[in-house]
Image (cartoon, rainbow, N blue to C red):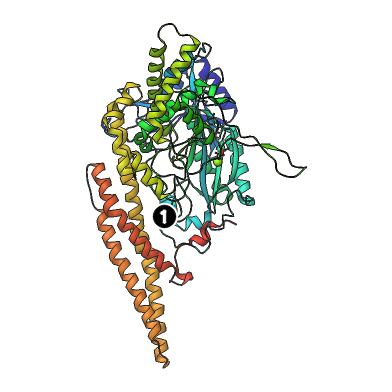
Amino acid sequence: DIVASVMKDWAVERGATHYTHWFQPLTGSTAEKHDSMIDTDSDGGMHFAFSGKALVQGEPDASSFPSGGLRATFEARGYTAWDPTSPAFLARSGGTATLCIPTVFVSWTGEALDKKTPLLRSMEALSKQALRIVRFFGNTDASRVTTTVGCEQEYFLIDAELARKRSDLMVCERTLFGARPPKGQQLEDHYFGAIPPRVLAFMTDLEEELFRLGIPVKTRHNEVAPGQYEFAPTFEYANVACDHQMLLMETIRRVAPKHGLFATLHEKPFTGMNGSGKHMNWSMTTDTGTNLLDPRDETHTNMQFLVFLCAVIRAIDLHADLLRASVASAANDHRLGANEAPPAIMSVFLGDMLEDIIDQLEKGSPNRTRKGGTLDLGSRTLPNIPRHSGDRNRTSPFAFTGNRFEFRAVGSSGTAAWPATVLNTIVADSIEHVANQLESAVGAKPTPAKVEQAARNVLRDLVKQHRRVVFGGDNYTEEWHAEAEARGLPNLKDTVEAIPVMLAKKNLTLFKRHKVLTKPEVEGRAMIFMESYVKRSQIESEQMVLMSRVLFLPASVEHQRRMAEAVAATEAAGIDASELREALDHFSELANRLRVLVDRLDEADNHHDEDPFAHATYIRETVHPLMEEVRELVDLLEVQVAAELWPVPSYRELMFLR
Ligand code: ADP
Ligand code: MG
């Protein structure tokens, strides 16, 4: 009651009248239901009140949230429970402030119906196992190991006025049509370029809002595609970082319109341009402040680091399928495996220095750490700068970047919580395996020599068994795809292939063993992810049919009429119009083909299947190819119809902000 009352005072002094339990249902966004803190007195007066009970638990009638069969709609009861590890905050919009309490969301029977509960459980599992390694190496001070996460958020900004004229952008957050412009990103002059003033004003405003929410943003810059930008907050404990990630996305969307901008966080707003990701930087740290993935100077002597490193490598090798599935969505399908994004094949990049140590580990006893040295820049006025011992690699889905791993396959619009949950769980499982081996090798009376020897033996075996998942080359090439196949690494090309692996026995057992998710909880999730794929795809194809019928076909008919009139007028004037007639012929044929195709797509949209897995397969096999054909035709028409008749702004206009 005291804590609640202090929170209330803090919030009321800053203009709040309402509070809400804020949570992350399985829809992929956030949910809030506001309750007033105003109470009436028995004598007719009013005062603010907020009890401990209201702080700790809420009971939203949440029957309309997806539960994947975990709960029938008639069993509407759900609970929200305060997550005190994530700071409460004030959401300001609509001229008012609301006290937001981060919570988890569970069913009446205690099943997790949100993304936060399993994340917290997975952090617990990882802490438990990682502590064993830390203890094994003689550290008795640490009492907890926490996962840290820092996400780099990419997004696109489009002039709001133009965006409003594109219902595909408004409804789907991506363009479903659009001919490739003559100038796209070929010149690569946007990346790290000067930030346009309007965008900078937006960014500054956004930063201020984020600071007010307690989100420590740090880096801002232009990204590769025209109109593409990035924001990166400083890393935090995983649960807080994932909450902040949701808030960051919401705030981007909310602040953009104030600057006449429309922000899209979709993974692929423009075909042919770079897509957006959310690089998830991830590490583990003790509560005494040691980053367990910091290799330090003489890395080959840092056995504890090497044990953690190899445990992560093992985790990725054994559970590449699950990690891949954790980033699967209809939207991310457009990005993963495209030429500028990591492929769907999970592999680990280590860099020269660590690969060299891995080589040594495999042989038995590492005895040197490769050094980067310094770079002499050749001018007396320039400093000699220290050089890293290896280059970076931008193409790997899972790269070691100095003192953390960077998981780059995460999509820009998704939540970080689910991939973080999966990563924590598979690493916890792997660390458990390694800890078992180490502990049994040294027996009851460990000596420093025994510890050293046990670590070496275990590491040698780990490297031998799991090295195949380590790859330092260019992940974008065809050769890597062939090589990965030869190495036996899974390549789950899209969501329809990826989601079902969640239900594999090994994965159900994994989640259960570490008490992260029960079998019904995993099944429910797989179901919801698949349904979401189906629904999003359906919205897109229906949107396509609609736009074709009410925008592009009428524009084409008008263009055709003009051409026909021109043919008639030319001939009436006694001039040969045969070429014009031919062009008209060709054009009307295109338009007719579109009409037929759109009808077919419309028909395909009517398909229904109770089983979302079967429906998703139908969509991938039948609907998506039709959508591609429709788009191709519309894009062809776009570059033939008179510009003044084309009913929506083109890529050329959308992508270059002024
Ligand atoms: P780059 O684009 O070079 O990969 P950025 O500076 O854009 O790097 O982003 C790096 C991200 O990694 C930041 O969010 C940063 O806070 C985060 N990060 C740094 N150290 C850690 C760590 N130990 N654990 C998790 N995230 C980290
Ligand atoms: Mg970056």
Measuring from the top left, give residue 297's x and y in whole percent.
59, 26
Measuring from the top left, give residue 409's x and y in whole percent.
44, 40
Query: Which of 366 and 2 lies nearest the eye of the viewer?
Result: 366
Measuring from the top left, give residue 506's x and y in whole percent.
29, 28
Does residue 39 show up? no
For this view, does 599 lie left or right of residue 368? left
- Mark 1 lies on a secondary structure that is helix
Residue receiving disc 1: 168
Does residue 353 show up? yes
* Figure quadrant, ligand 2: top right
Residue 475 placement: quadrant: top left
Tell me the kind of residue under disc 1. Answer: Asp
Residue 498 placement: quadrant: top left
* Residue 631 versus residue 138 in the image, above or below: below
- Residue under the point 42% across and 48% down: 335
* Residue 624 versus residue 367 in the image, above or below: below
Query: Which of 446 and 423 lies nearest the eye of the viewer?
Result: 446
